[in-house]
Each structure stands twice: as structure tokens, then as C-alpha cells.
Image (spheres, rainbow, N blue to C red):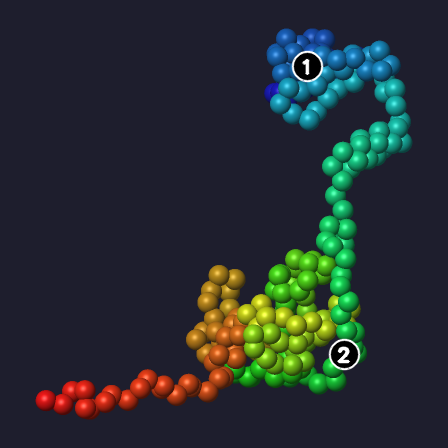
Amino acid sequence: MPDDHLPRIVDETWTCRACATAWPCPSAREHLAPGTCQCGAPTWWEHCGPRNWHVGPRCYSEQDRMNGLAHELRQIHEAQPHYPPSHRYPAKPRRAVRQCPPYEHIPGAAGDIRPGTWLWVKPGGLHRGWGDIHHLAMLTAVGTPKCEVWLHLDGTVHQVKADLLILELTARRVGVHVGRNQMLPDEWRWLRWTIQQHLDHGAPARPDTAPATQEALFAA
């Protein structure tokens, strides 16, 4: 509705700001839907907006308005309940619980992965009972295809695939300043590798097992 045709209220008399006639004026009626309050007073609602007008003195207090809003929100919640993640996921299976490991290791280069390295477990790395979110954990045993990690959340121990583990170490912590959409320099790309990539990088090169060429096959 045009703001020029909003009501002006003087001594409980409603007049149009532009037309100086009784509100709602003909220009305003095109954008309003009439109604009736529970007290019998006329009401007007915008067709394409959230505004509404209660002509005459208010028949409700601010507390009444808050109570009505709370009742409306409760009805919406009962019709479409939204539970926290702990209610949406199945029960957690038993896992061993330990104290925080006493060692800590900060990687200094690609492939430098040892117990004590802080990690993020990517969604899907744990049982669904822990939710589909990132979890902070410490590496306690290196292995393939799974590594053992100690979960910071509740101290439980899990076996997680190495390709679902990423370093907690960030570029800012090692003194590399990178913009939001900029790529890391080549010498620091390993900060965003998975643990599987680190293990593959640090693994010794496999010997060439191709069979030797038999000269007799090519003899004239």
C-alpha cells in the first residue's frame, strides 16, 4: 500500500494523510482486505504485506499480544516438530572411553603425521549416533585404511577411515595469510590434505615389479 495513504489518528479519528478524508480512502481500499476483530471493531489487512490496522481503541494489552504469539508458535511446533540432532539420530553404540592422550604433535611438513596430531573427523566418519557434523579429535594410532582417534567431545575412541580425517592445523596458525577465495601456496597445500594423502605422500616408493624382458624372445 502507498505510504502516502496511511492513516493519521487524531483524537481517535482516522483520516488519510493524502486525501484528508475518512480512512481508509478509496486509494487505500484497493490494497486492503476488510475484517472484524473479536471486539467488533473493523480491521484492515494488506493484500501483499504483513501490516494490519485495528480501527478504534485497542481491545488487548501487550501481554495479550505476547500470549497470542506464543500460542501460535506452539501450534506451529506441534504441527511441524523440530528436534535437536540428539533426537534425530539413533542411539550411540558403546565405544571405549579414555583420558586425553598426554602427547601432542604439530605437523611441520607434508607426510609428518604421528600420534598426537589434532584432526577434524569429517561427516560420515563416525557412527550416525554422533551426528553428521565435523568432530574434533586427536590421532592416537596411525594405520590404513583406518586410524584410531580420540574424540574430544566425550573421550570415546573410534576407528575412522584415513580419507575422512583432515588436519586441524590452519594456515593462520602457521603464519600463512590467505584470502577467503585464494589458494594456498604450493609449499603449504598439504594443510588441506586428508590423512590418507599424507600417508601416501610419506610412504616409500614401491619397487618396480614389472618382469624383466627376456632377451630370448627377441632373438633373431
Q: Secondary structure at mark 1?
A: strand
Badge 2: how crowded within 10 Å, few (<14), some, or many (20+)? some
Amino acid identity at mark 2: Cys
In the rendered structure, the answer to whether residue 140 lies left or right of residue 217 reads: right
Quadrant of residue 32 within the rendered picture = top right
Q: Secondary structure at mark 2?
A: loop
**Image marks 2 and 1: residues in contact by CB distance under 8 Å:** no
Q: Is residue 20 visible?
A: no
Badge 1: how crowded within 10 Å, few (<14), some, or many (20+)? few
What residue is at 52 percent from the left and 72 percent from the top?
193
Q: CA distance from mark 2 to mark 1?
A: 65 Å
What residue did someone put label 1 on? 33
What residue is at 63 percent from the left and 70 percent from the top?
160
In the rendered structure, the answer to whether residue 111 lies left or right of residue 141 reads: left
Residue extending farthest to the left is 220
Give coordinates of residue 130: x percent, y percent.
72, 61
Dot placed on the residue nearer the N-terminal end, 2 or 1 = 1
Q: State how many labels appear.
A: 2
Quadrant of residue 106 within the rendered picture = bottom right
Quadrant of residue 114 within the rendered picture = bottom right
Nearest to the observer: residue 33 or residue 110: 110
What residue is at 79 percent from the left and 13 percent from the top?
36
The disc placed on residue 130 is none
Give coordinates of residue 5: x percent, y percent.
65, 17
The disc placed on residue 100 is 2
In the rendered structure, the answer to whether residue 205 lies left or right of residue 100 reads: left
Give coordinates of residue 219: x percent, y percent.
14, 90
Give the position of the C terminus as an image quadrant: bottom left
What residue is at 45 percent from the left and 74 percent from the top?
185
